Structure formats: C-alpha cells, structure tokens
Amino acid sequence: MSRSLYLASAEPETGKSLIVLGVMNLLASQVGRVGFFRPIIHSGNQTDPHIRLVSERYDLPYEYDAMYGVKSDDALMKIQEGDTDSLITDIINKYKKLQKRCDFVLCEGTDFSGALSPFEFEFDARIANNLGTPLLSIISGHMKSVTEISDTAHVVRSILKNEKTYSVGLIVNRANEEELEAIQKRLDKIYPENEITFVISEKEILQRPTMRQIKDGLNASLVFGNDEALNHHIYDYKIAAMSLERILAHTSDGSLVVVPGDRTDVLLTMVMTLLSENYPHIGGILLTGGVKPDPYLVKLIDGLKKVNIAMLGVYTDTYTTAMRLNKIPSMLTPENERRLNIAIGHFENFVDGEQLARKISISRSDILTPIMFEFELFEKARSKRKHIVLPESEDERILEAVDILLRRNVVDITLLGNVEQVKQKTSALQIKPGKITIIDPAESELREKFAKEYYKLRKHKGVSEDAAFDIMGDVSYFGTMMVHLGYADGMVSGAMHTTQHTIRPAFEFVKTKPGVSIVSSSFFMCFEDRVLVYGDCAVNPNPNSEQLADIAISSAETAKSFGIEPRIAMLSYSTGESGKGEDVVKVREATRIARERRPDLSIEGPIQYDAAIDASVAKKKMPGSAVAGKATVFIFPDLNTGNNTYKAVQRAANAVAIGPVLQGLNKPVNDLSRGCLVKDIVNTVAITAIQAQIEPEK
C-alpha cells in the first residue's frame, strides 16, 4: 500500500501553498511515483491553482480529474442534506483510485473560503481519518503574539484528539522572525516528543503579487514588456495623481505606479528612473482608463534595451482599479521559477527535511528521476560549500541563476564585471546583490598579481609581461586564474562566450590531473527513472585508443562522484569479438587499456548500444556480462556519434540532458551552451561545486 500525508490549515491565511511546495519537493526528491490529491476544490471551470502548481512543477502523469475528490458546490449540497457519509465515500473512492498508481500521495486540505469554512479543520481531520492518512497541521503566525500562537496550537491539539486523528505534528508559518525561538519553546511544551514542530518566519516577498498575477487578476492587457518583467514582485501601489516631482519623491523599489493612460509625462519619467542610478527601480506601470500610449512612444521605450519593465493597461478608472488591486492574492505559480525557488529555499531553511522524512516514513527510492538527481546536486553542493566565479555578469540568465543559487544556499558566488553596472542590473531584475561578490578585472588589484603568475607560466610560449597584463583584463582568463590560485573553487562560463574562449585558459595553465592525458566531457542524461552518463559528446572529435580509455575512466569517476555506480559500455557498431574494422579495433584496444589501468571498474567493449542498455538484447548478444543490459556509463567512439546520439535520445525519449561537464582538469571549469536556460546554469554551477569538493591527487 502506498504511503501518504495530509496537510491541513487550522485557520485562514496560513500560507499553505509554501508548505505544500516544500513537502512536495522533499517527496519528489526521494520517492519514485508521487501523487497529489485535494479532497475538495472550488466549483467552476477554473483549474485549481494548487493542483496546477504541483502538477506542472513536478510533471505529474495524472489526469486533472484524478487529483481531486469533489467540487465545493456538490460537497455543500450533501452536507446540507445531512449526507456527509456519502460525501466522504465519494472522496475515498477517488483517492483510492489515485493511490493505486502512486508510491506516496500528498493530500492538501480545504482553503477556508465560502460556506464550508466554519468547520473545515474538523472536516479535514475526518477525511484524513477515513483515508488512513497522518495529518500535519498548519497555523498562521502572522500578526500574532507568542501567546496567541500557543493558544491556537492548544486548540488544534484538542480538535485532533477529539477526532482521534493520527497527528504528525504542527508547522507555524508566517511567524515574526524575532520570536521564532520563543514560539518553538512553547510548541515543545505543547507537543509530545513523537510529533514534530517547525516554525517558519514571514517571507515578505512571498506575500507580494507579481505583475503576472496583477495582469490576470485585473484581466489587463500587456502594453509593453516581456515574460521576465511579468515575474517582477510588487511591494506597494503608488497612485500617480500628483506633480512629477512629488511622484518621484514617493516611488520606491518594487512600486507599481498606477497612472491614467494619457499622462505621457509620468510614463516617460517612470521609464527614465529605470536608467538612473539616483532613483529606485519601480516594479511595473499600470495604465488606467482604457488609454494606451501612442505606438511611437512604445517604440521609443522598446529601443531602450536596458529597460526591463512590464506596462499593463485596463479600462477601469484609477479609483476602481486601486480598489481591485487590493483584492489580488499573492500566489505561487509554475511560470515563476525564481519565486518557486525562493519559497523552496525558505522552507528548507526552517524545516529539517531528514526529520520530516523519517516521521512520515519516506525511504529513498531505488529509481533516480531527474528531480531526484537535481535535489542530490543541491544537497551534495551544500554539504561542503564552495565558491564559484561567473565571468558573464552582463547576461540576465546568469543573474537569475545566481539569485536562485544564493536563495537555496548552494554556493558562494563571485561575478566579474563593472561593479555599478552589475548592481544596476540586479536591481532592475529585483535581485538583492548583498551576498554577491563583484570584481571588475579592469580595476582589481588582483590583476597585477594574476598577470605576473600568467607571465611566469607562459613566458616560454613568448608571452611578455605587458601582454600578460592585457590578457588578465579578459574575464575568462581572470576567472580561470582565480580558480588556479585558489581565490575561487571553480568557474562556469559560456552563456555569452564560445567554448574555446571559456576553456582555453584552463588548458593553458590549470592543466590536467596527474595520470590524465586528455580533457573530455560527459552529459548526465536524466530519464524518467534513471540517470546515465554519456561521454565524450562535446570536446574530442576523434580520440585514439589511449584517449578513449582515458575518457572512460574519467567518465566513471564523474559518475561515481554523483552517486551513480559506474558500469562502463565502450560503444561500437559490433558486440564482443565478432566485429572487424579499424573503428572496432580502436574500441577493443581502448577497453583493454582501461581494464588494465583500472581493474576495479566494470568495463565491457566493444558493445552495441542496444546490448548495453536492454537486458533482453544483452541476454542474447553478451550473456553473463556484468555490464551488458545494465550499463550506466556510455563511451562513444567519436564526437560525431556521441553528439548526435545524445541529442537524438534527448528529443526522442524526452530526457533532460545536463552538461557538458568537463572532466580531467586539475580544478573544475565548465562550459555552458549559449542557448542555455536559467535551470541549466543552476545545475552546472552545482555540478562544478561538487567537482571542487573532490580532493586532488597528490
């Protein structure tokens, strides 16, 4: 039977979605088939926002109708008719059908709105009892004293005791940050040792709506701006009905400026503040009255490439619009990756995941999904925190990735670039630069020291002292020298630069590890139920047998570093001893060399891809092999084969390809694709940090 947990709020405004997301993230990182179920959802045609959030975020394979029991209108009708048993039976039947398809089901209780709200918590307790699901209660600490929170916790305990509900414990969310310790002490006195309690502080940014939510809430049109600008958080509303001087005096970072659409003077002034270092960066502009700016004006603003702002338009007047704004709730949505990572990072800062997992009897699954692998990356990176340098601070994707990495406490970061420009750009993107170290190679006092080191290492190649100083003004060389001299533990670049620009400095003076003759690459190929390693698909066009053996050993070490047991398949167009030809001979010789150098590794070759991955084919072509049919590391004979295969598999099998990961260097330097996503950057930085944790051979 699958296991389960029921999350229930004991009152309104608890910020339950944060808890749902945090617990779901924990489950998805350790359990193979996770389900999500809501006993009752609101009636109407609109999709339940929490089902949508969880389903899209974690790519759940279940139909929407399978993830809820009944709608609120039907539930209310049965309650009013005194037919509560029938209602609960309907919920149980839907839940049981989903449960059969899952290893673990997370249930989320009702929302404290409408006619059901007076007795929702008791009703949630009854449903949890009938589903046979332990319950984790959630209460709000917002604007409450320690005593008030303590009183609410007592009431919750009493209700669950009366309902004879199996209680896992309690989470207090949105608590005053200065009273966390005092609240925890009170909870420790109320709750027995066999129940868990956590206290999570208020996170202001999560209580603020985004421009996207305002757009949807007002049914507004997008007059100007891109998708990223719609993710900006709005901290307050400013009605621009005054003179320009007074408007400028009252705006602040993250303000939504609400202005009649015909006030062109205000519109242009607000846009100019985004280019100025002397004024706050507003979060967005809302034009009222159905008046939109002239297309020539929009074209003028669009030409200001540094302006990252969303401008919305509504037909209602300014007063009506302001009233409607105050009713728009702040929500977590799957479109806003940064906001989700803020929420998950905040949850992880206050909730002990291991303790919660033990309490609800989560044991790590034998399968390895992409989400599990990414979770492992973060956990491994955090375990021995490293310092990574990113040379491409001009790229917004890099800055967004930095924001996620710092909020999730994965690594320490140094950005290279003009200090004021980086600060301005982070401010425009609503990223707090406080934890980021920014170095301008052109102005840094380290440049002279780095130049002397580079001259010492490269003078035999004809490099002069003046040339060395000039070269150290280049961000790739400067960043790589930071790694070489220990000012950083690793470097990630390539979002804006070519592969050659990124890795050439590493080839020049970071060099390869002892015993390694060649720098190579590998990809982590994340399938639905496992993660495989493909090498080399990005660097070496046509390696010889010695180099191919090197690539196999390096790829095995990469796999081992990330918790994947290396079983190495040396791929060719024939299996075993039957094949002939120069290419097969190369792979056969590479297999012999690799086995000779590393007899501790399981290596098979030459072997065809189908025999390496499919147990039924392996049984026919290579029976008794320790690798055939269960290979985890696939070594391709050349770049043409490897690059085409990984891309074909990525598309055909809908696999997530993470990489390329450079291997064989003394210190980690990794290359990004210029088409990379923010998620790719985040994963590559985490991988680089883990590589940096490996002690160098002496």
Image: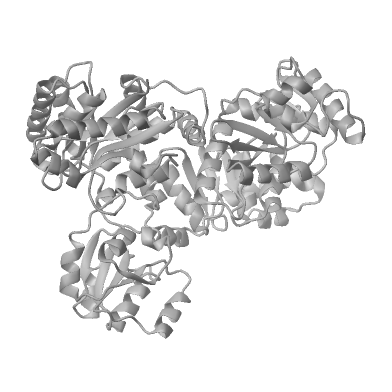
Q: Identify which residue is drawn at 71% across, 21% down.
A: 627
- Residue 190 percent location from the top left of the image: 12, 22
The image quarter containing residue 128 is top left
The image shows residue 605 at horizontal and vertical percentages of: 79, 25
Left or right: 54 as drawn, with respect to 563: left
In the image, 359 versus 203, the foreground residue is 359
Q: Which residue does the image show at 81% across and 33% down from the upper left?
A: 572
**Where residue 624 appears, x then y in whole percent?**
74, 14
Identify the image quadrant of the N terminus. top left
Tell me the residue at 71%/32% (across/down): 634
Inspect this view and state whether residue 17 appears: yes
Residue 158 in which image quadrant: top left
Foreground of the two, 244 or 40: 40
Side of 144 where 465 appears, left or right? right
**Residue nearer the viewer, 415 or 331:** 331
Left or right position of 373 against 67: right
